[in-house]
Image: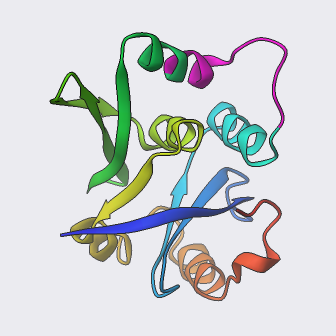
């Protein structure tokens, strides 16, 4: 089953110093942190802040290509979590045909906010993410988990 979620914030993991995109469901019952690279975090932050670069960035280029080719990004799906790696796909519509394209979640999210596409997460991903060990040190993992559970989107540096 798929749960619709939205980007609620972008922050830095205090343990690894890596950017995290926070997805939250409409009822504020579930939060999914996804660690992303600095380039993708910057692309998301620019769009959240409505900052237009002087020339198209890669995710802007992808959106422009979709438009020029007559395709529309209808949704992004975070579909799997294997060995601490999230998997996603883009669902496109073109000439009445549905096209599925494999994508990294970070790129899919950066494109989704540009194309105003909905974001969905498979419930199996949400269930697995509760127990995934993303840190080698268990004490750090537990501290990070408690910290993530206590987050309020209103306290985040970037929010939508």
The residue drawn where x is 70% and y is 15% is 56
Q: Residue 15, relative to residue 69: is it above or below?
A: below
> Position of 111 compared to 104: left or right?
right
Question: What is the quadrant of the N terminus in the image?
Answer: bottom left
What residue span does the magenta drawing correspond to? Answer: 51-62
The answer to which image quadrant residue 47 occupies is top right
Q: Residue 119, relative to residue 29: is it above or below?
A: above
> Position of 80 compared to 138: left or right?
left
Residue in front for this viewpoint, 147 or 52: 52
The residue drawn where x is 37% and y is 55% is 84
The answer to which image quadrant residue 110 occupies is top right
Residue 119, given in percent of the width and then of the height, sits at 41, 55
Question: What is the quadrant of the C terminus in the image?
Answer: bottom right
The residue drawn where x is 54% and y is 16% is 64
The answer to which image quadrant residue 122 occupies is bottom left
Residue 75, given in percent of the width and then of the height, sits at 35, 46
């Amino acid at each position: 089953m798929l749960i619709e979620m939205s980007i609620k914030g972008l922050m830095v993991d205090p343990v690894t110093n890596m950017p995290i995109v926070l997805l939250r469901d409409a009822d504020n019952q579930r939060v999914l942190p996804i660690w992303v690279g600095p380039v993708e975090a910057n692309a998301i932050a620019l769009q959240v802040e409505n900052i237009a670069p002087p020339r198209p960035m890669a995710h802007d280029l992808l959106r422009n290509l979709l438009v020029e080719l007559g395709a529309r990004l209808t949704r992004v799906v975070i579909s799997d979590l294997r060995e601490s790696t999230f998997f996603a796909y883009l669902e496109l519509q073109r000439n009445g045909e549905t096209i599925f394209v494999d994508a990294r979640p970070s790129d899919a999210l950066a494109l989704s906010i540009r194309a105003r596409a909905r974001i969905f997460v498979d419930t199996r991903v949400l269930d697995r993410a509760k127990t995934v060990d993303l840190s080698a040190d268990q004490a750090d993992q537990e501290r990070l988990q408690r910290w993530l559970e206590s987050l309020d989107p209103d306290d985040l540096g970037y929010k939508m």
